[in-house]
Amino acid sequence: MSGGLLALAVGLLALGSSACAAAGPPRATEPPTGAPAAAPVATAAPAVGGLPTAPGQPFHVVALDPGIIPAVPLYVALDRGYFAEEGLEVELQPSPDATTGAQMLAVGQAAFNMAVPDPVLFNALARGIDIKLLASGTVNGPEDRPAAFLVRSDLIASGQYASPADLKGLTIATPANSSEFYVERVLRQGGLTLDDVQRVIMPVPDILSAFASQRIAAAWQVEPLITAAVRRNLATVIAGTGELFPGANGMDLVMAGSFGREQPEVARRFVVAYLRGLRDYYHAFNKGDGDREPVVQALVAHTVVKDPALYDVMGMHTVDPNGALNSASWDAFQEFYLRMGLQQQRVDLARHVDESYLQAALDRLGREP
């Protein structure tokens, strides 16, 4: 597996396991060749909250880029000129991992990030790092499977596996301890717990070969490797993120709290552009009444999945076109991390949610039905 594909796969664990997103190669901060030209920056309005008014001087904003498909609102907003229309020059900086991302927000090296319900984030909030949850990035639709639980196909064909109860005593691979959040939910369907199976931590690229050599019976896997396993008849999807935790937010747009206090108008305009990018994806992939080409073009430009045809067969995520937050769903992740010893203390997420920026964006753009 190429290093780029590995980066994507590990990063995609954010959706299904809340593992830390891995860094990918640096990504362009300008629209790719052939992308729609950015609209001219408006200069007639007076400066508000630090916004410049001189022609050709948009406000520079740094946003962290996990380099994965769920960050699509950022890519679309950048490549289609939505940020530019708001008077913003957005620079996407690769996000190495959840720890570094939280630190960069804390010290003002970045203003925005796409974050997952990871123990690193919760522990940072518990230490007093000021990060605000602004809008949802993904919402687990009932049939979503950007990450999923797979069982070896030969076990199913032979009848050895008929339900999760048949996994007792067998070996299950996960890319990280935090991946076991969803694995536990699968096992509960068969009356089992994590203690009833053999658990092994295994790097993402090794899972396919472990299926092929029959070293494991099941695993938690991510796209595009789910599609690869199914196409090679190595494993079968048993349950995806949507079935196991419908309605949960798998990724949210977050902001350094200090940035919101210092540049409230910039933050509002950023969320307007973000929401426009989110809606482009929603109409193209979820509702199916929008133009897919510019969305796929943005994904091809900013992620390592360069084959446009793959976006027609991979498990893609669902979004809420109004960016509605379900921060309560993250409390379930907290419960798991606390039990597993991955998180030191519970965080009151209500203290970190700020929907005022999202509401301002909805006031401007209107609410989708």
Image (tube, helix red, strand yellow):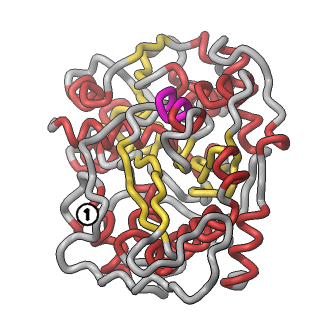
Q: Which residue is drawn at the image coordinates 41% and 33% (left, top)?
A: 151
The residue where tag 1 is placed is 300
In the image, 152 versus 272, the foreground residue is 272
Q: Which residue is drawn at the image coordinates 39% and 64% (left, top)?
A: 75
Q: Residues within 10 Å of mark 1 (few under 14, many from 20)?
A: some
x, y percent for residue 99: 51, 26
Q: Magenta stretch: residue 346 in it?
A: no
Circle 1 SS class: helix
In the image, 143 versus 191, the foreground residue is 143
x, y percent for residue 287: 54, 79
* Residue 303, image quadrant: bottom left
Q: Which residue is drawn at the image coordinates 56% and 29% (left, top)?
A: 183
> Does the image show residue 53?
yes
Whether residue 114 is situated above or below residue 107 in the rendered picture: below
* Residue 363, image quadrant: bottom right
Whether residue 61 is situated above or below residue 101 in the rendered picture: below
In the rendered structure, the answer to whether residue 70 lies left or right of residue 204 reads right
Q: Tell me which segment is drawn in magenta.
A: 98-103
Which amino acid type corresponds to the residue marked 1 in the rendered image? Answer: Val
* Main SS class of the magenta portion in the image: helix
x, y percent for residue 158: 35, 32
